[in-house]
Image (cartoon, grey):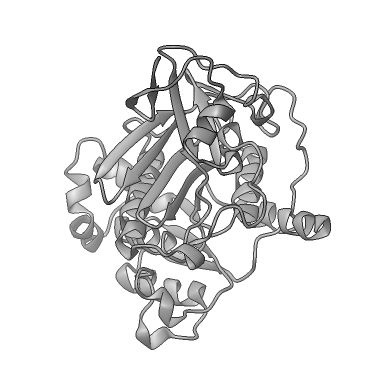
Amino acid sequence: MNITLNGEIKTVHDNITVLGLLELLQIQHQRVAVELNESIVKKDNYGSTAIKNGDILEVVSFMGGGTV
Amino acid sequence: MDFTEDQILRYSRHILLPEVGGEGQEKILNARVVLVGAGGLGSPVGYYLAAAGVGTIGVIDNDRVEISNLQRQIAHNTSRLGVLKADSAKETFETLNHDVKVVTHIERLTSANIKNIIKDYDIVVDGSDNFPTRYLVNDACVMLKKTLISAAVFRFEGQLMSIFPGEGPCYRCLFEVPPPPGMVPSCQEAGILGVVTGVIGTLQATEVIKAILGIGHPLKGKLLLWNALDMSFRTVKVPRNKECPVCGEHPTITELIDYEQFCSMSH
């Protein structure tokens, strides 16, 4: 199935969860916030939130640092 | 307010803009903005706010200028090594424009002092270099209903979001809790292309000026992402989170948190 990830179309296998997608992308879930169809996904729900064909996801990295 | 002849000349390119005009310039001269940090982001933000004539600029910083700062922290210079950054920034900004009064706050922000420092300002500009301060500033701004223009940089990238408590989402609506200590490297550890702080800082200053003037469309409910290598801008919509622990319908954070202490206690 196809999803839109950070503005780009990406093909992933069916029945993937948010956590599964992050693992596929080799992203540590503690380092990002995930938005699914313009709603923030709670971290506790990453493993239980299934991604569907056509879903729009934004994976936004924590950026703490200014450079004081 | 009557402008002096010098002021009419100094701000003429602002006054010419119908969206600014004399009335807008007066708003800028009366504005009170506080910078959290006089480093990579605070330098360009303060520089442009001073040039624009922001009447009162607070600078919160207790660090001293080091030579490794000068690749990006343009408020300082080689003759100021070892000088407090707040004092160095004051000198730079007030020399640029005598209409500007810089108030230095030479301390590290904590739950005990932050409200007292920011209460006298209209807008808070976060260019801090660590998560405990970033969350502290967000929570205090939500509690005091202060407009917060929050930005961060990392390597070749930057993020920017404007937070209007009560009207749009806050930082915690997107990033509910800080990442575990050590999970996200700092610029000190990971490096930063100096000019990236200039790009994000001047975008941050643009949001401040727009907020003072009440013009255009702020980054309310939107996170701007910029990547220098791709030269790409993206905007991600950020919804308000009804369950946000600080600005949601039933806030669970009602007192400010000093995360550093919390972190060190838990280790």
Q: Quadrant of residue A58?
A: top left
Residue at 42% of width from left, 22% of height from top? A12
Q: Quadrant of residue A7?
A: top left
- As drawn, which residue projects farthest toward the front? A13
- As drawn, which residue projects farthest toward the right? B265
Q: Please state, as top left, top right, bottom left or bottom right, where the C terminus of chain B lies in the image.
A: bottom right
Location of residue B164 with respect to B203 vertically, above or below? above
- As drawn, which residue projects farthest toward the top? A53
Describe residue A7's horizontal placement relative to residue B140 as left or right: left
Residue at 47% of width from left, 79% of height from top? B65
Describe residue B151's horizontal placement relative to residue B7 as left or right: right
Q: Position of residue B114 (x, y in %)?
A: 67, 55
Q: Is residue A27 visible?
A: yes
Q: Position of residue B75 (x, y in %)?
A: 37, 71
Describe residue A66's horizontal placement relative to residue B198 as left or right: right
Residue at 48% of width from left, 46% of height from top? B150
Q: Position of residue A35 (x, y in %)?
A: 51, 26
Residue at 64% of width from left, 36% of height from top? B176
**Viewer-proximal residue among B2 and B230:** B230
Q: Position of residue B15 (x, y in %)?
A: 21, 46
The number of numbered badges drawn on the structure is 0
**Viewer-proximal residue among B11 and B48:** B48
**Viewer-proximal residue among B44 and B234:** B234
Q: Is residue B28 visible?
A: no
Q: Quadrant of residue A9?
A: top left
Location of residue B171 with respect to B119 vertically, above or below? above
Location of residue B264 with respect to A32 vertically, above or below? below
